[in-house]
Image: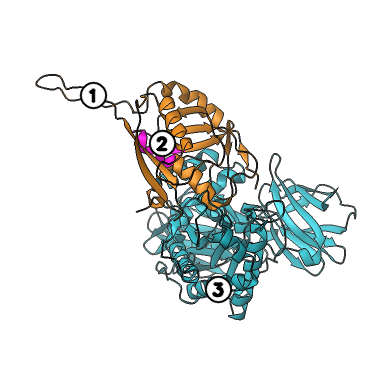
């Protein structure tokens, strides 16, 4: 089935771009005053969590270290997608059936992140499992590594799409822990 | 109430707000309807219009019908299904002291499909027959795929029914034709009667498929040979199950390494399953019975119009994990944030195209059908696991477009993997297809014959007029 496109994301994109520079983390509440010496800054984590599809039809969690974890949300999400695209080191399948690239990333104040990926070639995404793998490997990975992000909507080629034939992709999706192997 | 379509207004309702005693004056006497503050018993009002109102335990919903229109609504929800189409209500329908109540704005929205409105305020109400009609335009278009009939002027998808060489499109409002329609392309004539457009077709022709278009709103019927027609929508007696063979037409779905097509396998399995269910005495309809492209919206709309007790969408899977095998069964996602998002979208987009309206179906699924859908999915998955001989993976949840519009228990089953060469070869085998059909029929039969009962609220003791 050909994807059905909608043109609703542009306004949200413009409104939210300014938030990107603020990083993944939402603005924290003021910390209580510390009675003694200043708290050491928390070192940036160097481990990321990725999700890959397996033969058992579940997503599988894979942790790996990266030299540096960017603070800004766009850079961090670009890193995550590139690591997903690089593939599993434990033999799980690739979630993206085409050499995807990240076009734009933006987030809004409600915790929704919009990830604009390059468009897939026609008919390359097939079957429910193909859609689930692509969608939830990405959604789960982004949410697991970006505190403050609660839902992710995938855009393709700058367009919001309704579906590739099965899943409703017309809105931001929450992580789906039930699709991850126990 | 049989003369309601010719009346300008009657039935003064002398409501004693907020005491709860509502005196309804009709031509034959007085009737009492329950009320509290600004809430009024909508079941009582609907019955005053002549509609029959019944509770459907399977769907957890009330269905009001008068033979021409039907309205389904769920206490706790702010949606209604009018003639098979989802319509956002201006507020929720509630349960109060064993009665199904809503404010006057919501009550009017529920009465509108039957040609009635409620007027007035807290002191007194009138049930008023709505006058006027909506002009529609009917045109005949010849295309490469056959004759298309295009109806312009209404944004709501009409209910389609058939009689001998005639198609009836029933709208939720009265309609008139803006201009006469000359016979053309197999259409012999078109006449309006109240809210129904009668289309007389040439012998051997039927409506093969229908679909809505947007901007401006149109409803399109494609004509073709009668033997290719989609399932009729007359409501037979007894529980109805709707099976949905995934994909079709230009949408081939997944493809196996040997060229096996998902759309062909799903149709074959659905036909076999339907035959087994019919043999077991369960009325079964297919969303398509040929190689037709049917929109995802139309698939569930058919099940909604038929008031089906179960909807099962049949698919064949494909995975980037080439070793994936076995069956998967899904039902709707249960993430509360999805529901909130859907409801927010509904508020923002009330009156927008069907795409936006679709999103808010989440709350119906929550209110009425989620548990039953899980049970249906579980029964299907258990049967399929036994067939494939694989360990139980349980059922899964995800937001499927084809399930989002269903107002009855609904599930989607992936009967195997075309991306797995071994399974692909088996899935085109008639023996395998028969075995899968038997498994699906067994699960659906168990579901229908031993339904999970949702106890209805205390019956609304509204006297009939």
Position of B347 relative to B463 (above/below): above
Mark 2 — residue?
A: A142
Chain under callout 3: B
Where does label 1 land, which residue?
A30
Q: Which hue belongs to chain A? A: orange
Specify whether residue A4 is in view: yes
Which residue in the structure is indicated by mark 3?
Answer: B441
What secondary structure is found at the residue carrying circle 2? helix
Question: Mark 1 or mark 2, which has the lower sequence index?
Answer: 1
- Nearest to viewer (mark 1 / mark 3): 3
Q: Which residues are magenta?
A: A139-152
- The residue lying toward the viewer, choosing from B464 and B341, is B341
Residue sitting at the far right: B183
Image colour for chain B is cyan
- The residue positioned 75% from the left and 66% from the top of the image is B162
Instruction: Please state the horizontal and vertical placement of residue B132, each as a whole percent of the image.
Output: 70, 50
- Chain identity of mark 2: A
Q: Secondary structure at mark 3?
A: helix
């Amino acid at each position: 089935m050909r994807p059905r496109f909608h043109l609703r994301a542009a306004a949200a994109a413009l409104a939210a771009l300014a938030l990107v520079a603020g990083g993944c983390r939402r603005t924290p509440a003021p910390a209580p005053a510390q009675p003694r010496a200043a708290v050491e800054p928390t070192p940036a984590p160097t481990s990321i969590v990725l999700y890959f599809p397996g033969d058992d039809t579940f997503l599988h969690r894979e942790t790996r270290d990266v030299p540096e974890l960017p603070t800004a949300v766009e850079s961090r999400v670009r890193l995550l997608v590139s690591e997903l695209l690089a593939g599993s080191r434990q033999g799980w399948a690739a979630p993206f059936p085409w050499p995807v690239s990240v076009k734009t990333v933006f987030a809004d104040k409600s915790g929704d992140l919009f990830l604009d990926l390059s468009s897939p070639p026609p008919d390359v995404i097939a079957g429910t499992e193909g859609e689930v793998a692509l969608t939830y490997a990405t959604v789960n990975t982004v949410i697991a590594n970006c505190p403050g992000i609660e839902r992710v909507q995938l855009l393709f080629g700058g367009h919001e799409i309704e579906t590739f034939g099965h899943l409703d992709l017309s809105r931001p999706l929450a992580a789906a822990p039930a699709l991850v192997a126990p | 109430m049989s003369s309601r379509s010719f009346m300008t207004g009657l039935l003064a309702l002398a409501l004693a707000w907020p005491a709860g005693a509502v005196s309804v004056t009709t031509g034959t006497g007085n009737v009492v309807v329950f009320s509290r503050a600004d809430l009024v018993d909508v079941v009582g009002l609907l019955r005053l219009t002549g509609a029959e109102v019944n509770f459907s335990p399977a769907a957890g919903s009330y269905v009001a019908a008068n033979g021409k229109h039907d309205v389904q609504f769920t206490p706790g929800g702010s949606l209604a299904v009018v003639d098979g189409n989802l319509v956002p209500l201006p507020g929720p329908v509630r349960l109060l002291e064993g009665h199904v109540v809503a404010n006057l704005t919501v009550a009017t929205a529920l009465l509108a499909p039957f040609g009635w409105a409620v007027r007035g305020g807290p002191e007194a109400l009138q049930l008023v027959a709505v006058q006027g009609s909506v002009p529609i335009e009917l045109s005949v278009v010849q295309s490469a795929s056959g004759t298309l009939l295009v109806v312009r002027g209404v944004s709501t998808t009409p209910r389609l029914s058939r009689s001998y060489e005639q198609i009836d499109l029933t709208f939720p409002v009265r309609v008139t034709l803006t201009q006469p329609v000359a016979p053309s392309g197999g259409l012999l004539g078109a006449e309006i009667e109240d809210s129904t457009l009668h289309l007389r077709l040439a012998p051997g022709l039927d409506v093969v498929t229908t679909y809505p278009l947007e901007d401006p709103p149109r409803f399109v019927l494609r004509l073709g040979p009668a033997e290719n027609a989609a399932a009729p929508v007359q409501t037979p007696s007894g529980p109805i199950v709707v099976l949905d063979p995934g994909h079709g037409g230009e949408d081939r779905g997944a493809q196996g390494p040997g060229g096996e097509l998902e759309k062909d396998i799903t149709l074959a399995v659905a036909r076999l399953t339907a035959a087994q269910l019919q043999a077991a005495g369960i009325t079964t309809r297919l969303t398509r019975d040929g190689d037709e492209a049917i929109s995802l919206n139309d698939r569930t709309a058919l099940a909604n119009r038929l008031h089906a007790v179960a909807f099962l969408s049949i698919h064949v899977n494909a995975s980037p994990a080439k070793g994936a095998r076995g069956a998967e069964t899904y039902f709707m996602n249960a993430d509360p944030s999805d529901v909130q998002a859907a409801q927010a979208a509904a508020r923002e987009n009330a009156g927008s195209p069907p795409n936006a309206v679709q999103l808010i179906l989440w709350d119906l699924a929550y209110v009425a059908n989620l548990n039953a859908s899980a049970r249906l999915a579980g029964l299907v998955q258990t049967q399929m696991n036994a067939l494939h001989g694989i360990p139980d993976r349980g059922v899964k949840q995800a937001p499927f477009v084809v399930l989002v519009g269903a107002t009855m228990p609904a599930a989607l089953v992936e009967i195997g993997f075309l991306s797995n060469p071994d399974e692909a070869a088996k899935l085109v085998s008639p023996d395998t297809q028969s075995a899968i059909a038997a498994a699906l029929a067994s699960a659906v039969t168990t579901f229908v014959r031993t339904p999970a009962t949702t106890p209805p609220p205390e019956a609304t003791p509204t006297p009939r007029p």
